[in-house]
Amino acid sequence: MSRILLVGSGASGVHFALTALERGHQVTMLDVGNQRPAAVLPQASFEQLKSLLPDPVAYFLGERGEGVVYPAPQGSYYGHPPSKQYVFDIPAGFAARASSMEPLFSFARGGFAEAWTAGAYAFNSADLEEFPFGYAELEPCYARVARRIGVGGMPDDLERFIPLNGEYLTPLPLDPHSQLLWDRYHLRREQLNRSLGFYLGRSRVATLSQPYGDRQACTQLGRCLWGCPVEAIYTPVATLRECLARPGFRYVPGVLARHFEFDELGRITKLIARRTADGGRVEFESEVVALAAGALASSKIVLDSIFRRTGKTSVLPGLMDNRQVHVPFLSPRMIGLPVRTASYQFHHLAIGIERAAARDYVHGQITTLKAASIHPIVQSLPVDLRGALALFRGIRAGLGVVNLNLSDSRRSDSFLTLQPINGSDETELRIHYADDPAEAGQISAAMRSLKRALKALGCFVPPGMTRIRPKGASVHYAGTLPMSASKKEHTCDPAGRSHDFQNLYIVDGAGFPFLPSKNLTFTLMANAIRIAELI
Amino acid sequence: MTQAVPAVEPLAAECRVFCRYLADLEPSAYVLACYQRAWPTVPAGSSQFLIDRALLSVARWGSLATRVADAYARMFRPYAPLRQRLVLLLAILENSPPSDAPLNSAVEGSRPAIMVGMALTLLTGGVCLLAGILLLGPLHLASVLGGKR
């Protein structure tokens, strides 16, 4: 039995903690822990909120309109709602600067997965080719995650890319637009598979179609983006509650882990943190330290620790992030049909586009438009706003968006380093993400296949409305302290143990040596369980 | 970016015109208060460019003029203060009763009829854009060529 000091309460942290507790270890979890505000009117639908709340504009747009998506060169079809601002708030004492990307950070209780869209896709053997272990080692961990969090899914054409592991829940019922796409796909399936390598299936999502543990099934309120008030969408806070109910677990919120001190043998002796309330210094001692603060924040702790002991600013190469492309489409057959805003808002369908090399597989999710903030969409139509509103209402039932994800690999010109801040004890994380010269070609090829596939499904992709999201927008950061079978500086072994510090474990995405196009959160959780089993 | 809030009455008058343009209704006291509350955080609430000031001036004449100015701005000044303010108001209206219901609904019924309606909308938009080009184009061109703000 070990005493483990764990940093971070996100998807990786809570599943690592719960597994370690199940194995009899003692776990102290340090966390900034920005807290989710209480759900407002938990039984009210998206539309009902507007008439029931005393100040609906403040809820949906923020007190000062900070949730408004204004016209801008790199406009988006949606923004982060004010109710999710706590997910992205950065505490005093954490500084970072990026070039060529717009990274986000999360210091929330539950981490980024407080604002995820619940996609739970297992990596397959091809995705894990660069990992120092195979799919067989991860499969039972996926099954455990699925049991813990409740994942909806079913056998379908995506199984060739996304293995189903263990017991999955019945998926949520399809909305009419998704049903239309599903039906049309099955009419043209062979042609789409054979000529385009295009496959469609049900999204694997950690959203409940039936009560599960202390969480309720989806009540179809249409409030997913603003935060599910009944917790039908899994967030790590649910697993944190399980940890809190176990002896041997101690949760310490309100502290920002800064760096650790280590001896000449590379053994960590203590971890130094800062209280967020008053900036005071706190120290923690432990036999084992596990970092699960997210790839960027965990890497900063490592860089800071090396700098404070040696005066050396190290470089951690290999930063990765999935590039995302939003492709709006229109299904003319849906025009004239009603739209039910009180329904599950996120994606029901997922797509896979096969490429010549398995590692270049393109993953996507199809979200049909139901409840939504309409102003970001209306302003993007190529006419005046009054005309755009009329057009939008005419085509609304047939609108949808495909969110395409591209894989990323470690490159030496995408890296993290540290910059001391003059005249203070502080340091700033420097993030540099270089353009991938192959990316433009990959996006073009994926877009060609997707447009042809959507056409075969009876959809139309309006010209000029596809948006390549800014680098860093997917928040799938990984690769800066990768697992490696051979002992190299700034890497960890297949069990997640650092090659530089003998009692340090890297539990989050920093340890991934490759980033497939599938959303990584499910694998973060499974890998965290795997690492906890090996301690 | 925060900026000085103009006097309440001009802002309210602007809000009334824009509200009629976007939703065919008079703004409630709540909508007026929200518009005023959020106005200082509009990223480009004001501008030193002559064309941007002209777009706002024309738009304040009435809802038809707003549409003409907006049609021109959508094509030639998509991030102008006029567009930013209209988008702010649209965001407020879609979240406040009673305008939220019609703005958030879809047109239901016969598909051909809806398509014809949308074609007419596009045609009207085109006419407004043409009017905007005739009204604001020369000023815009002159200010660009003359290098004036």
Image (cartoon, rainbow, N blue to C red):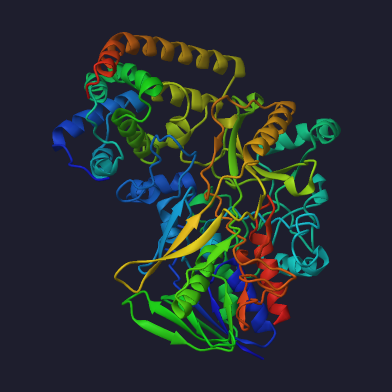
Specify the quadrant that holds the C terminus of chain A.
Answer: bottom right
Q: Is residue A144 above or below residue B117?
A: below
Q: Position of residue B131 (x, y in %)?
A: 34, 9
Specify the quadrant that holds the N terminus of chain A.
Answer: bottom right
Q: Is residue A144 above or below residue A22?
A: above
Q: Is residue A8 left or right of residue A425?
A: right
* Residue A198, visible in the rendered structure: yes
Q: Residue at x 78, y 52 (%)?
A: A154
Q: Is residue A237 left or right of residue B136?
A: right
Q: Is residue A103 left or right of residue A363?
A: left
Q: Position of residue B142 (x, y in %)?
A: 26, 13
> Which sits in the foreground, A427 or A168?
A427
Q: Position of residue A123 (x, y in %)?
A: 74, 57
The answer to which quarter of the image holds residue A37 is bottom left
Q: Is residue B128 above or below residue A491?
A: above
Total numbered labels: 0
* Residue A230, visible in the rendered structure: no
Most distant residue in the bottom direction: A1
The answer to which quarter of the image holds residue A339 is top right
Q: Position of residue A89 (x, y in %)?
A: 40, 61
